[in-house]
Structures are given as structure tokens and as C-alpha cells.
Image (cartoon, rainbow, N blue to C red):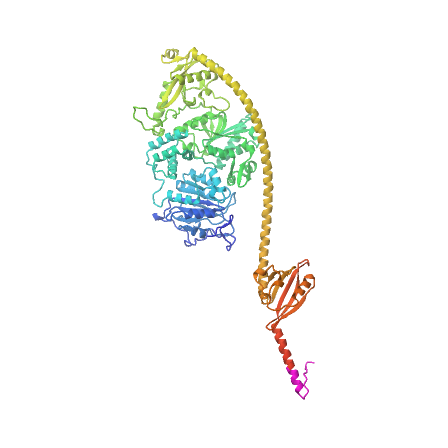
Amino acid sequence: MMVPAPGDDILDPDNSADGGDASAPDSQHGGQPNEISTDTQNKVLHIVGIGASAGGLEALEALLGSLPPDARPAFVVAQHLSPDRRSLLVELMSRCTPLQVRQAVDGTVLLPGTVSIGPPNHDIRVDRERLLVSGHEPRFGPSPSIDRLFDSIAEHWGEHGVAVVLSGTGSDGARGLVAVKAAGGLTMAQTPDSARFAGMPTAAITLGGAELVLEPAAIGRRLGELLPPSSRDPADGALGENADPVNVFSFLSRLRHLTGIDFSQYKATTVRRQLQRRMMICQKHSIEEYLKLLETDSRESLALVKNLLVSVTAFFRDPAMFAALAEKLAHYVNEWPGRYRLRVWVPGCATGEEAYSLGMLISEVLGHPKNLADHLKIFATDLDEESLAVARRATYPAVDAEAIPEGLRNRFVSFLDGELTINESLRRCLVFARHNIAEDPPLPRLDLISCRNTLIYFNPPLQRRTLVMLHTGLVPGGLLFLGPSESPSVNAAGFTALDGANNIYQRTSEPQPVVIASGAFSDLSAPSVPGQAARPAVPPDSLPEEHTATLEALVRSSCPPCVVVDENHELVEVIGEVAPYCRLPEGRISTAATAFLLPELQTEARALVLLVRAEGQPVRSRPLLLKESGLLLRLEARPLRVRDRQFTVLSFLPEREAPEEHAGSDDVRERDTDFEQEISRMESDLLSSQESQRSSMAQLEAANQELEASAEELQAFSEELQSTNEELQASNQELVSLNHQLRIRSEQLQAFTSDLENIQNSLTQGMVIVDKAANVNRYTPLAVRVFGLVEADIGRPLLGCPTTIPLPGLKEALREVLSGSPRRVIEALNEEAAYLVQVLPYREQDGQQRGAIISLTDVSELREMRQAAEASLGDFASLTDTLDQAVWKRDISL
């Protein structure tokens, strides 16, 4: 089979320029669209969307050719094609697969085991079980849009959809692949090494949408394995709706040990769906098998975490909500005219599009100040490091720019090589960092928090704790921006609705609600204590809410105000009202529990925690006086063991409230003088270490200056490379234009050559054209009657070729004509034929001599007629000579 060169569009040049009618009847299936069949044999269980561009023909052939002949999914292909010629893709694909291949027609019903190929210059989508084919709409990006096909699969087919990206330039399909993955579908991409053009597969992998990266033939085989022809849905497996939730929750506890992330507070349906997908992809049929894979392959645990985090976002998602937010922000800014810099937090930012959208929006609200970074700081956080890497790169597919309003797009976005890049003025306003919203403390003094489409994945207890965190981070009057399906009204106090329809809320001045986290006391993955029966882990959702509230109230009533810290001295629990002893520090937030205490308590608290860690016994401080409140209290630290984890409870004991109660405790000792001396020694060592650190910092600063100088040199070099690249692009454009002109000239030359060949074949005379050196350039078929010419004689001397008739004087005639004579005529004859040979000059349009033309006219008949006339005249003369009478001939017209 012939394989087109790169850029060929598998097109039939005989078709009209309109590219065919996308709504024309399907030639293989009659003139009317199929009606939805009620036959269960024709029910489509899965749909596979395939996107390809340049170089996609070979990949499509390999993929479809490796599918089993009894494959039952419906396949829909969106291939970038030339818009002005009919596609031959249907005919070519029909030769490489036993499946039925047809051109997609608007309204046609999807059928199992059928490949539907989109027509040129038309978008193709799915609406449930029907195909939608529409004309090309003005937009960014190529046609057909692979992203639009994948988006429709994600919307209508969810976890029963599959998206595949093959060879092509640009980045079309990368964004749609992420949407299919977020909806629970399976996503695949061709390996860049096997693609003739690696742009599209590379973009799909970089954006994080591709779960399997295989060669095209391997993709076809894997589809046959994952989507069997039986009527059983592969999604009905070890984690179906009737699966044991205890086993799933225990599995997540084990996953926490492997990855450090606790998903036990995520919604069970989300966890079950994503876990089932990974098990299906890895072809594991039980949780035990999959757990063994996780323990031996760290890449799989990372893949599962990425699925559970569901990193999906877009520029200006829900435009109406962003417009409403701009109005509320403008009012907020006007109420705070003295505010120097707005502080914004975007938890769960994924790949950063929403964070950049907020930056553009706030810049517009502020009137686009000259130095935007002085007026705005956006903290964008997420758990997925790969998504954060994409966000920091600030480069996205060019088609994503369609969602950005034109004015903001022109100001903040630039385009290069099919990608959009966020400009530096906006990028300086954003800081991307890893942060776990379910466990880490919030950022302080925030004016706006945009937490959209994150809470929907949490169960109610975690939603409540998260909203308390957001309440803590916001300044009074600060704004909270949630997703379309989220609302704090029933989950947390401290917020009032500014625009309930668009989920914009404002923090009130109410005290922060107190919620006791359950994570630290529920380490469900620890082994059971020897001698005790192992108890199954119970997910928090299975505990009645009333029971949980009762336990929280009991702890608050029976314990003094306290905090719980873990082995790393990080804060994990707050019990009771601890506000009189704590403060929110300025600057970067530390997770160390002692950093949140008042300054006069920090040193003592650190000492107590270290002492409890070393000896494992409760210890109490000496009386401490708080400067601001005048309160006298003691700090008490007690060890707390939960399964195999060791926590420390740091309690605040006011002396004036119950001095007798705590003074006589026999099991608690106060710090002794030896310990004070050890603390002094350690402080001295610390001062020495600090001095050494200052010296190291000075050296580091010097090295940093050198690095900055090197960075400036690299930036200058980069600018030079950019300038050179622009020059190369300009030269490339000139070469493209020149190539176009040469192609037109070539077509004209081909037409002239065809005309000349037809003219010379129609001549009734023989003709030979020679150059200045009398070498043969061209000859007509009739010339071989005199000259014994063959195709190989072109370029050879004419006088060296044999002749069928002697041509005396030909050499002299050629010499004279090539020297400037206008014309020479010679006769060539033998007993059988006679030719009149004319030698004429061959000149250019400017008159310069280029060669000579030898024309051969067959005069054999004229010669015979003349000889017959001469013979008749001789006979007549002989006859008249023998007659006695006089004979004359008279012309009566005279």
C-alpha cells in the first residue's frame, strides 16, 4: 500500500473544492440515518475516540489493524485533513481492518464494531448514541477539533469512554484527554518515539492526560484486552457497587503509608471509581493483587494518586461566575482603598489555568497597574507535583486561548509554535507550591480564596474542617469563591452569601468554629497490638454524625485546652479554646506546632516536647506569665500513643483556675535544674551554629550573585537565539513563497511540455532540433525515417547518427546555418524515396542563436509525378516527330 508523505491528507483531487457534504447520506448504509436499535446485540457499551493529524495514517493503520475482528466498541476518528478535497481515509482504513469503516454522517447512530471517520473541515462529536457532524466554526486550532470530540465523550460516556491521541503536530487533543480521564474514562497516547510527528502525543503526556503510552499496534491490542466483546462491562469488577467498603478503606490506609497522602476522607464513590480504573488498566482482578503491584512499583502508586486528585481546570471556567466575581472584587477593592497588595489563594490549582485567570481578572479590576506584582500576590497550591510543573511552565495549547476574553488575551498571552505562553508581568504575581489542604494549615491574611471543584471530592467531615481552614485564612470581609456544585451554607458558620447564584461568599467577623480533626487518631493502617484481636478499620463516614459530635464534646469537657503534635512536632489536633495562648505568625507558615504559640511560651513548649520524647513521661513547666493578658499558667506535656504512632499532648493549665488540682499530681514532674543547664548548653551550641550559618549564608549570597550574573548572560544569549530564530522564520517564509512560485512554474512548464509533445506528434513532417554543437535535443517520430535515432541519441552529435538516405551537404548546411545563414535546402533521394531537407536557425526571443532545426519533407510522390510527366512529354515529343501533320495546342481562354 502506498504511504503518503508527511503533510499529505489522504485526499482525492477529483472531488469539488467544498470537501463534500457532511450531511450527505452514508454510501455504505443507505440514504437515511439509522434509528436507535433496541437489539441488545447492537448496544454500544464503550466508545473509543481517536485523534490524529500529520503522520496519523500509519498509526491509524497499525491501531485498527491490530484490533480483534470481534471488537465491539464504537470507534470515532477525528483526523486533521485538508478542507478542500475529498478524503480517501475511509477507503484506506477499510483495507487494514475487518471492522466496518464509514464516513460519519450527522445524526447517525453509533454501532458496535464500526469505525466512523469525520469528514474534512467538519467537527465531529457524540451525543449519547448519535454522531453530530457540524461545519467548521471560527476558532483557535485546527479542524476537526479533537478536543471537542473528547469533551463530548467525557460528557456523555464518562467511565465508558476511551480517548486515544496519535501522531500529529501541535497540541490538539491534550486538553480533551484530561477531560476524559477526569470523567473516569481510559486515556492513551502514542509513544513520541514511534510517531512521525511527536507534537500531539508529547503535549498529551506533558499535560498529564495520558494514562497509557504505547505504540499504535500495542494500543489496539490493549483495547482488545480491556474492552472484551462480551456483554459484561469491565467496570463491574472487584470494586463494584456491592464491594466491601471496609476493604477499600483499609487499602487506602495502606496507600497512605506508601504515598504519604490520606485519601480516607474522600468520597467513597470517587475512590472506588478511580481505583477500579487503575485496576482495570493494570489488569488486576482483586485488591490484593493490585496492592502487591503498588508495593513493588512506585510509578503505579503515583499514577493512582494522580487519578484520585482529579486535576482538571481551564481558563475562565464558568465565565458568568467570573464576571460576577469581578463585580464583587471591584466593590471589595473600593472598600479597602489603603490596601497595598491583594493576597489570593487558589488551593487545588491543578495545572494553573484558574490561577492565571484570576490574575488577569484582578488586574482588570485594578485598572491594569504598571507593576502588577506590587499590587497582587496569588498563592496557587496543589498536591500533584507534575501539575504544578505545568503551571510553573505557564505554557498551554493555543486552543485554550479561546476561553480568555480578547482584551485580556492580547495583554497577557503570547503565541509561539501552536502554544500560548503567559506573559512575565502576570507570572511574577504567582507562587506555585505543594500544599495538602486536608492536613496543612492555611495561608494567612488572604483577601480572596478560590476553592472551586475541590470540596466536592471530600466527605462532609473533611468539608467542614476545610471550610474552617478557609475561614481562618481569610481576613474579615474576605471573599470565598466556590465551584458551581459547592456551598458552605450547610457545612460551616462564618460565611455569608454575597452572590449565592454564583457561589461567592464573604467571611464574617464571627469567631472561628472549633473542629477537632480525626486524622491523627485514626491511623488505621497500623498493625494490631500482639495479643489483641485485629479490628477492621472503620471509615469515618460509617460513624453516625451524632456519635462523632458527642465524642468531640466529651473530649472538650474533660480535657484542658491543648494541642496534639506528632513525631515531627507538627500540629495535628486542636482541642478546646486555645486562642489566648496562640497567635498566627507573620511570613511563611510553618507546620511546627510551637510556631503558633505566643513568644513567651515557645521556648518552654519546645523543651517540654523534647523531654517527653526522650523520657516518655509527663512533664510540667514552671509557672509562666503572659505579658499581654497577665495570665499565669503552666504548660504540661504528656505522651499519647495511638497504635504504632507516638503523639504529644501539650496542655495549657491556668494557675488561677485550679492551682490545687495540678500542683499535687504525682505522675507529673516539673523540669529540674539539670535540664535547664542542658538547655543553656544547647542554646550556646545553637548560637555557634547560627554564626556558622551566617558565614555560609554570606558565601551562598556571593555564589548567588555569580549565578544571577550567569543567568543574565544566559538571558542575553536566549534573546540572541530568539532573534536568530525570528530571522530563520523570516527566511523560511521566503523559502515557502519561493517554493510556491517554483511549483507554479513547474506546473506551467509541464503544461508547455505536454503541448509541445502533442504538437510534434501531430506534425506530418519529420523534424530534428540540434544545439549549437549540432547535438540532438529533440526529434519527431517521422524523423526516424531518415535518421536512425533512438532515445539514447539525445545529447549526441546528429552527424554521427546513421541515415537511411544519403544526405550530401548536410554537414556544410548545418555549419552555415549555425554560423548565421538564414536557411539552407538540400535534397536527399534514393531509388525508393526522396526528401526535401531544410536547415533553419533556432533562435531565442532576444534573437540569439540557440541551434538549428532540420525539417524533412517527403517529396517522393512529387518526384514520381514529375518523372511521369517528363516520360509522357518525351513520348508525346517522339510521336509528334513521326507525324506529317502539324500539331499544336491552343489555350482557348487567351
* First to last magenta residue range: 875-894
From this view, report whether residue 569 is shown above or below residue 386: above
Q: How many marks?
A: 0
Residue 139 image point, x, y percent: 52, 43
Residue 482 image point, x, y percent: 45, 32
Residue 370 visible at all:
no
Q: Residue at x 58, y 54 (%)?
A: 746
Left or right: 856 as drawn, with respect to 647: right
Specify the principal SS of the magenta part: loop
Residue farthest to the bottom, as pictured:
884
Front-most of residues 770 and 271: 770
Left or right: 454 as drawn, with respect to 334: left
From this view, report whether residue 111 is shown above or below residue 447: below
Please tell me whether residue 86 belongs to the stretch shown in magenta: no
From this view, report whether residue 845 is shown above or below residue 574: below
Residue 247 image point, x, y percent: 33, 32
* Picture quadrant where residue 618 is located: top left
Q: Residue at x 65, y 85 (%)?
A: 879
* Picture quadrant where residue 240 is located: top left
Front-most of residues 189 and 808: 808
Front-most of residues 676 and 633: 676
Residue 505 image point, x, y percent: 46, 30
Please tell me whether residue 882 belongs to the stretch shown in magenta: yes
Left or right: 690 as drawn, with respect to 546: right
Front-most of residues 251 and 379: 251
Q: Quadrant of the C terminus?
A: bottom right
Residue 373 visible at all:
yes
